Amino acid sequence: MSKQLKPATLCVQAGWQPKNGESRVLPIYQSTTFKYDNTEEMADLFDLKKEGYFYTRLANPTNDAVAQKIAALEGGIAAMLTSSGQAANFYAIFNICQAGDHFVTSNEIYGGTYNLFGVTLKKLGIECTFISQEASEEEIDAAFRPNTKALFGETISNPGCQILDIEKFARIAHKHGVPLIVDNTFPTPINCRPFEWGADIVTHSTTKYMDGHATQVGGVVVDSGNFDWEAHADKFPGLCTPDESYHGLTYTKAFGKMAYMTKLVAQLMRDLGSIPSPHNAFLLNLGLETLHLRMPQHCRNAQRIAEFLEKDERVAWVHYSGLPSDKNYALAQKYLPNGSCGVIAFGLKGDRQTAVQFMDSLRMIAIVTHVADARTCVLHPASHTHRQLSDEQLREAGVAPDLIRLSVGIEDCDDILDDIRQALDQI
């Protein structure tokens, strides 16, 4: 489908174009395997000589249609669905890093990703250096090494709500001959398309706004097709030298701009298998069909609530980039002129117990280990998602010990405000 179509149309129409007499709605191909009439046809699929379906761990029509829709929304050349956002970030890095390699990442990232990068990947021999995304270009340059293979950041950090200067990060990454990988979960391509600002790879936890209804856990990796792997062939042997598991095939020579994505599917998904079920992909597609309608409502509601919190004397601080007083306001006007997302970070005057008392007093707003769906919900990261981190580690990760993450839903804003007011009255 033409990339000239507007995002709202892509949300509804991209990925699945039924032929005459076929299902108007994307079907669920709930099958592990696919039949062929002769041995040669299947052999060509295994040798990557032809495209097609033979086993759902590698490719499935339902999953591929949804991946194509997301690629179209981001302006990428291809995408691959994964079983979670965590898996997407792991695959994005592991596709170009191996034991002995290094990458640089903003410290303003989701706690699970922070642990994945700083602890688990280290066990695989892959090191990372955490840097402040507000550091000068020279300071970030100093974190790079000869074996550095990527730079990573989140468009809007979870849970700190800081905005990434994508152009700055892209400039630094490309100066060092490595791609910029951006997790674009919070704004979604409705509010920001990082490829337009120089990013090379985009990831998402599709569990969040893309699904929008908390019905499935999933992730996606999207490739822009813009990074020239061959120009830095010595850094990326996995893409630019023969893969013995495919009869000596070299991905960049055989697939050109599709090299990164082909390796991601044919090698990593083949061996690691973090696939979503076709049914989960079907549910994700239903969410994507209304993404362009939901995101503006999330932003409208969050803006009103952030303005209310900023004026309330019981609130110590608020981070929401739609507030002119926010330190990220200028960056948000540049990268997110139509709104950021529905997530607000704020702290109350008092201590950790004050935050707990406030949340326990909420009636409609639920305390859940989730964010970014239709229902307003709240979390205290220091007590929940980030509780494995010390106060010092929390601050290094950009998470204040008193930070409350409020994910504003699409309910009537007056009802959300009423619940917040009554809970504040009880602290």
Image: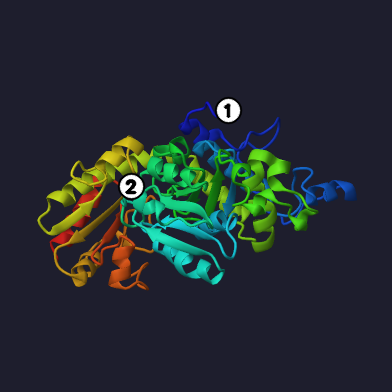
Closer to the camera in the image, 31 or 99: 99
Q: Tell me the element at label 2.
A: loop
Amino acid type, residue under disc 1 in the picture: Ser
Position of 349 compared to 398: left or right? left
Q: Residues within 10 Å of mark 1 (few under 14, many from 20)?
A: few
| Residue sitting nearer the eye, 379 or 349 | 349
The amino acid marked with disc number 2 is: Ile
Label 2 vs 1, first from the N-terminus:
1
Q: Residue at x 21, y 53 (%)?
A: 318
Question: Which residue is tagged 1?
Answer: 2
The kind of secondary structure element at disc 1 is loop
Q: As rendered, which of 48 and 413 lies closer to the eye?
A: 48
Residue 163, disc: 2
Q: Residue at x 22, y 48 (%)?
A: 305
Name the residue located 48 percent from the left edge and 55 percent from the top edge: 215
Disc on res. 403: none
